[in-house]
Structure formats: structure tokens, C-alpha cells
Image (cartoon, rainbow, N blue to C red):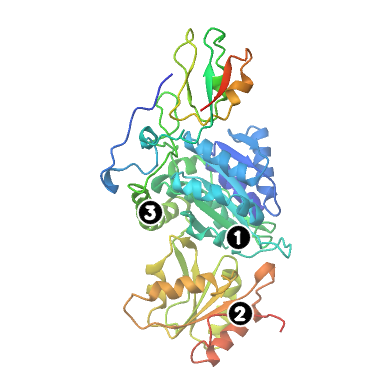
Amino acid sequence: MKHDKKKVEIKCASNMPDMTASLGSMASNKTASWRNLRPEIDESKCIKCFICWKFCPDAAIDFINENTPPKINYDYCKGCGICATECPTKCIEMVEE
Amino acid sequence: MEKVILGNHAVSYGALVSRVQTIAAYPITPQTLIVERLSEMVADGDLDAIFTKVESEHSALASTIGSSSVGARAFTATSSQGLALMHEMIHWAAGARLPIVLANVNRAMAPGWNIWTDQNDSLSCRDTGWMQVYCQNNQEVLDSIIMGYKVSEQVLLPTMVSLDAFVLSHTAENVDIPDIKLVDKYLPPYKLKIKMDVDDPHSFGALSSPENYMEFRYKMQEAMYKAEDIIIKEGKEFERIFGRKYGMVEEYRTEGAEIILVVSATIASTARASIDSLRAKGIKIGLLRIRVFRPFPVKDVARVLLNKKKAIVIDRNISYGKSGIFFDEIKGAFYNIEGEKPKIFGYIAGLGGRDVTPEAIFDMVNDAMRKDKPEKDIIWSGVKL
């Protein structure tokens, strides 16, 4: 799993890429402040199927490795609850903030 | 190879010899024949491309944006209501700087429901960052698809190639389909510098803040400036290889002319014949056909129209509350340019596929010749009052 780590340094138009790619703008723009319900994974029940990671529409669940339960990134998770609904062992609970 | 083909199939063959790699297809009259023929080319193994049937035009362009983003030469086609449904993605394709070529069959917008030709569908995309080409015959349609990729892939802006509904789309003409090996020489394989690639990941379409959004827009405009030079350069290169010449505009009998008729698309063919008749009567009139509408050919328009007495612009479109759109663009193009400006007469004609006949053109020319200057910005041609 590779991550995009090439934040583009923008000083003026001439050194910018044409495309709005790799701006790195979301690193500082944390978008989870409107979350009402927070998903919490009970790691003891997690079978590491990574279905939650596949289903997260905002890529806010991080894959660490095959033997480690995935980790929810609370800087970007909006609390939609898709992960909790899809989890086959029901080990994700939606907790009020 | 010379073949008698419909304008729609000229588009299909243009895509074939350009070796497009993806086609997203959703049917709409009068465009359907374009993707239908392409589906046969793919099924028969003549074209090595992924043909995707989608559930709407919005998805057709979204899918095309996806395949262009991974570096494929991507194609789609639509018309009228379909182009309107694509509109969100039309902005996206240009803003993402993807060299997509889209064929649009110019068809009037509903209601009243109408499948015949006018230009309000594509001209509603004027301010999106797409280059726009308006074709006058089936040969130009085919050639413009090839040149569209050649120019788009250099400036990273998409190209919309427009052809008139039925007048071209469903009319058979003699078309030279160039040898694909010759096209390969003109149009090398497409290589996108920054693309979606799992081995070299980038984020795409992320937040662009007030600190950098304007710079991206500035760069789109710079690309449009550059596009004008490249369209001219590639038009000459196209002529060298294929023997057919294309530029931003086309002039006909403008030498010694005092009046210039300005038209676009298929009205040009009728207008050329009309110019011949008028010249035979001793009227000093010539023709300027606007081929490329975006980038707008300001220099050519000024060169041809300055120091002429009158210009007569025929618009098969209308910007409600203002005037014909080409008329408005031409008038605006002059404002800061030094020189004697002609009186510009703007006629609205041929909306919803009404024929613009030689008689209609003679009426417009006679009307403009009778008057010293236009009384208003819109003069309706042939409306039953």
C-alpha cells in the first residue's frame, strides 16, 4: 500500500502542475468536525477481513497490515456508519460524540 | 481510402484512426450512430478499445474522465439534452486538464422537443475551458477528431467537435479515410505526465484553496492562448501529411470585399454558393467562416473584418436577452483593436433545424445593404410575424 506523499510546493503559477494533483491540501484541511456518531472497532472481535476499509467512501480507514485490525482516521471520518453496517462480526459500534 | 459515409460515421472513423482506447456510450438522437459504429469496430476487432455502456450522459463523461486520468486516449459522443446532462462533468474534464475529444451533434434544446440542428447546446458550454470546433462537411468532421487529439494532448484541454444534426450527421458524403499508419505518424501514442497510477500515487481533485485556485484558472487561460498557435501549427502539419488545410477560420473571396458574411458550420457551404451569385452581380462580398470558436480567433476576425464597410453575422443560436452568440463575440473582439470597424449586422436564422437557404441569405444581405447601420443587435431572419 503506497501513499501519495508528494505534496506540491506552490509559489507561483509557473512552478505549479497543470492538474490539481497532489496539492497536499487535505493534510491540513481536517473534515470530521461535523461527525455526530463515531465508529469504534472492538479489536478483540475483528477478524481482519478489511471489508470496512473497502467500503469506507471517504478512505478514512487505514490499512496497516494483514495481521493488524484497520485503524479509523478520526480527522476525516464523517461517521456515516457504513463500516458498522457492513462489518460481518458487528465489531464496530457507533458511539455518540 | 475514399468512402461515402454519414457525418456520424466520419466521427467513428476519426476515432478509429486516432486509435482511441476507451469509448463511453449512451445513445441519443442524432448521435447514436457514432457509438453504434464504434461498438461494431470494437466487436469486430478492428479497434483495440474498451467500449463501456453507461446509464446516462453524466456517467459517459465521468467514465471518460476516469479513463483519460489513467492515461488512455478517451472518446465519447453526445448531443443536445445529453450534453446538458454532462454539464457538471464538462467543467470537470477541462479543470482536470484532460485531453478528451468529444463529438457533439449540434441539436436544438427542448422544449419544444426538437431533434434538428442549432448550436445552443454546445455554445452553452462556452465558458467551461473546452476548445470548440464547428465543422462544415464530413471530411472536416473526421479530420477534426484526429487534430483534436493532437492539439488537446499538447495543451491539456479537451476538444468538442461539433457537427450539424442531420445536415451532416445523417448525410452521406465522399470522405477520405486516411491510412491509419499515416495517422500514426501525425498522432503519436498519448503519454500523460501526471496520471492515476497505483505504482506512483497522486491525489486528484482535492481541495484547491483561495491561495491557488486562481493560478489553476490562469494556467487554463494560458493553455487557451497556446492552443491558438498549436491549432494553426498542427493544421499546417496536417496539410503536409494529408493534403487538407485547416486553421482557426476559413476565408472565401474576401479579396477586395466591402461586405463580409460571417457564418459557422454547414451554413458556410450554402453561403459560399450565395457569395458566388452575389459576386456575379457585382456585389463586393466575401465569406469568413469561424471554424474554431474556443479559443476565439480574435486576430483572424480583426484581420478580415477591419476596414470593411459591413459585416453580416448569421447565428444559428441565440443568447436570450442579448443577441446571437457569434455576433456578440465578434463585436466584443474588436473593441480594443485599432482600425476602422465595420457596421456589424446580427441575424438569427435556422434555429431548430429550419433551413438557411440561399434565398434567406440573399434576404439578409439585401437587408444589411439597404441600411446604413443596424437598428438593434438582433435581426430575425424568416420568422413568421
Residue for badge 1: B121
Question: Depth check: B50 or B273 in front?
Answer: B50
User: Toward the viewer: A60 or A6?
Assistant: A60
B293 relative position to B141: left or right: left
| Label 1 element class | helix
Q: Which quarter of the rendered picture does the C terminus of chain B lie within?
A: bottom right
> Against B309, is B181 above or below?
above
Residue toward you, B7 or B178: B7
Q: Secondary structure at mark 3?
A: helix
Task: Characterize the local packing of mark 3: few (<14), some (14-19) or many (20 or more) Cα atoms within 10 angstroms.
Answer: some
Secondary structure beneath label 2:
helix
Q: Chain of mark 3?
A: B
Looking at marks 1 and 3 on the same chain, the residue that comes earlier in the sequence is marked by 1
Q: Chain of mark 2?
A: B
Dot 3 corresponds to which residue? B230
Which one is in front in this view, the residue at disc 1 or the one at disc 3?
1
Identity of the amino acid at label 1?
Asp
Contact (Cβ within 8 Å) of mark 1 with mark 3 = no
Q: Is residue B104 above or below residue B97?
A: below
Please provide percent x and percent y for residue B236: 40, 56
- Name the residue type under label 3: Ile
The residue positioned 48% from the left and 43% from the top of the image is: B182
Residue drawn at x 70%, y 63% as measured from the top left: B116
Residue A72: x %, y % from top left = 48, 21
Looking at the image, tell me whether mark 1 or mark 2 is earlier in sequence order.
1
> Can residue B2 be seen at all in this image of the molecule?
no
Q: Nearer the viewer, mark 1 or mark 2?
A: 1
What residue does disc 2 label? B361
